[in-house]
Image: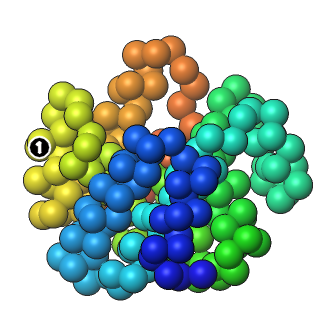
């Protein structure tokens, strides 16, 4: 299913109104970034629209779905099952809507914690998620500007935000976030 109108009506069934607004903001930003960095705009739109599809699945069901789909639940995921709305969401939309583009599915899977060696589309969704027009936190404006200038620098700023926020709340940091950071730093040095 790739019809945008149909997708939005599916989203309205499972997401709160504010989350639909956020999703449309991510889509707008992702399409803009795709134009700037030379990514396929349709893929950016599709991945953005579905990125938070599983956001409101409760912890018990999230853990059940993770088991059902063979997603490895590490200690950080076990502590905060909602982090798995990325990987679980990707599996659900593949099964329910027949979306099989691996880059789109990976962009959804890794939009929460990232991974080493992210593709351009994965980075676009990760950054667009944090910089879309409805986001409001200290430093968001600087991040928004970077998001349309230099994707790797924008990734670093996003990771800085996410990791600092996690540290402040005394929560565990997912190993993927650290690996994402290290891998981008290596990219930038090259
Ligand atoms: Fe999300
Ligand atoms: Fe999101």
Q: Can residue 176 be seen in this view?
A: no
Dividing the picture into quadrants, the one containing residue 32 is bottom left
Q: Residue at image x 21%, y 79%?
A: 35
Is 25 displayed left or right of 77 in the figure?
Answer: left
Mark 1 Cα shell of 10 Å, populated few (<14), some (14-19), many (≥20): few
Q: Position of residue 166 (x, y in %)?
A: 45, 25
Q: Which residue, given by chain and number where applicable, does mark 1 sit on?
A: 142
Q: Can residue 4 be seen in this view?
A: yes
Tell which of 121 and 4 is nearer to you.
4
Q: Ligand 2: does it lie within 8 Å of the C-beta at label 1?
A: no
The relative height of residue 70 versus residue 157 in the rendered view (above or below) is below
Q: Where is residue 24 in the image (x, y as percent from the top left)?
A: 35, 59
The relative height of residue 124 versus residue 170 in the rendered view (above or below) is below
Count of picture labels: 1
- Label 1 SS: helix
Q: Position of residue 106 (x, y in %)?
A: 57, 68
Q: Residue at image x 39%, y 82%?
A: 42
The quarter of the rendered structure image containing the C terminus is bottom left
Here the colouring is: rainbow
The quarter of the rendered structure image containing the N terminus is bottom right
Q: Residue at image x 16%, y 34%?
A: 139
Dividing the picture into quadrants, the one containing residue 79 is top right
Is 110 displayed left or right of 41 in the figure?
Answer: right
Is 135 displayed left or right of 87 in the figure?
Answer: left
Q: Where is residue 162 in the image (x, y as percent from the top left)?
A: 39, 35
Q: Residue at image x 53%, y 54%?
A: 12
């Amino acid at each position: 299913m790739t019809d945008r109108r149909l997708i939005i009506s599916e989203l309205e069934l499972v997401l709160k109104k504010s989350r639909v607004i956020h999703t449309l903001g991510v889509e707008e930003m992702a399409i803009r970034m795709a134009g700037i960095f030379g990514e396929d705009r349709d893929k950016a739109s599709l991945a953005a629209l579905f990125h938070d599809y599983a956001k409101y699945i409760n912890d018990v069901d999230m853990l059940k779905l993770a088991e059902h789909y063979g997603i490895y639940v590490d200690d950080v995921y076990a502590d905060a099952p909602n982090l798995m709305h990325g990987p679980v969401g990707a599996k659900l939309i593949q099964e329910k809507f027949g979306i099989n583009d691996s880059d789109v599915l990976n962009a959804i899977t890794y939009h929460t914690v990232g991974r080493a060696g992210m593709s351009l589309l994965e980075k676009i969704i990760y950054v667009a998620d944090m910089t879309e027009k409805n986001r409001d936190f200290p430093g968001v404006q600087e991040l928004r500007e970077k998001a349309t200038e230099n994707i790797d620098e924008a990734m670093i700023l996003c990771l800085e935000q996410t990791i600092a926020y996690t540290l402040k709340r005394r929560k565990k940091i997912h190993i993927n976030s650290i690996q994402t950071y290290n891998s981008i730093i290596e990219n930038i040095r090259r």
